[in-house]
Image (spheres, grey):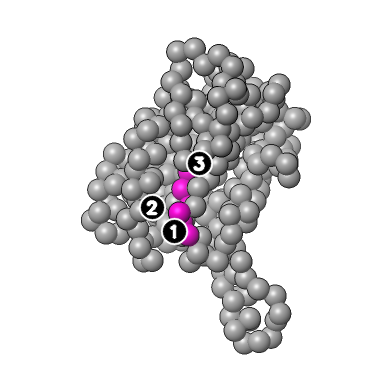
Amino acid sequence: MSSACSSAVELLGPVTGTLQGINIRSAGLVDYQDSWQAMREFTRLRDSSTPDEIWLLQHPQVFTLGQAGKTEHLLCPGDIPVLNTDRGGQVTYHGPGQLVMYTLLNLKRAGLGIRGLVSLIEDTVIDCLASHDIEAVSRHDAPGVYVDGSKIAALGLRVSRGCSYHGLALNVDADLEPFARINPCGFRNLAATSMSELGVSTTVESVAVSLSESFISSFTASTLQKGTETVTNNNGENNGSAD
């Protein structure tokens, strides 16, 4: 990584692990605006050789509005601050007890499109929840992961120069009351749930390890598959095309 990229992520601390060439940073509780600025700087300064990174953290209480976010979906934020961001989507809530996984990935290098990344993240969360005996699903009309109609994980991404940032927020043992102050992701009367509400006793740190390891394995496998498809195309043996 360039020294410029290194300085952009100083507040997150050092790399805490590397898995299949992807750096992992576990940062604990980090101010949302600080991490957002670090993501933007990292993405702006990275080059074609910069390793991908996964950031695992939590945020103090905050509501965030996506680029297309409508203030009408902020019902009564009260004393929780509201920030406008550059991710996709409407309004969501972050707070302690919620695992945030930011995916700083060179999608162009991986041969992966944004829809493919969304599906990978959703499928990883669904598999993680299944390991705790929670049956979850995704929805074609609304990105995220749901359990019996209640939202347990929200997604919001941005791609710049072929690289993604922002990512996933999974409710582990978060306070769910603030979700009643908004229309989560722009949907009226959409309930939120958490792993703890569904009877799972675990920690954000434990889920962070299993979720990140599973996601990196799936992402790497997808990248290898796309690489094989590209070679096949170049040999003229298959009319399909890689993303």
Q: Which residue is mark 2?
A: 43
- Residue bounds of the magenta highlight: 160-166
Q: Which of the numbered marks, if any, corresponds to residue 87?
A: 3
Q: Residue most toward the right? A: 148
Report x, y in % for residue 226: 59, 69
Q: Report which quarter residue 184 is drawn in.
A: top right
Quick one: SS at disc 1? loop
Residue drawn 49% across the image and 52% down it: 159
SS majority, magenta: strand
Report x, y in % for residue 174: 54, 23
Residue 82 lies left or right of residue 38; in this view the side is right
Quick one: SS at disc 2? helix
Residue 44 lies left or right of residue 178; in this view the side is left
Q: Alpha carbon of mark 2 to alpha carbon of mark 3: how far? A: 13 Å
Q: Is residue 163 part of the magenta span, yes or no?
A: yes
Name the quadrant of the C terminus.
Answer: bottom right
Earlier residue among tags 2 and 3: 2
Q: Report which quarter residue 151 is drawn in.
A: top right
Q: Identity of the amino acid at label 1?
A: Arg
In this picture, is 5 found above or below 32?
below
Q: Alpha carbon of mark 1 to alpha carbon of mark 2: how far? A: 8 Å
Q: Which residue is mark 1?
A: 161
Observer able to see residue 119: yes
In this picture, is 4 found above or below 233?
above
Q: Nearer the viewer, residue 100 or 195?
A: 100
Name the quadrant of the N terminus.
Answer: bottom left
Residue drawn 25% across the image and 54% down it: 4
Earlier residue among tags 1 and 3: 3
CB under 8 Å between callouts 1 and 2? yes
- Bin the neighbour count of mark 3 within 10 Å (Cα to Cα): few under 14, some 14-19, many 20 and up: many
Report x, y in % for residue 43: 38, 52
Residue drawn 62% across the image and 87% down it: 235
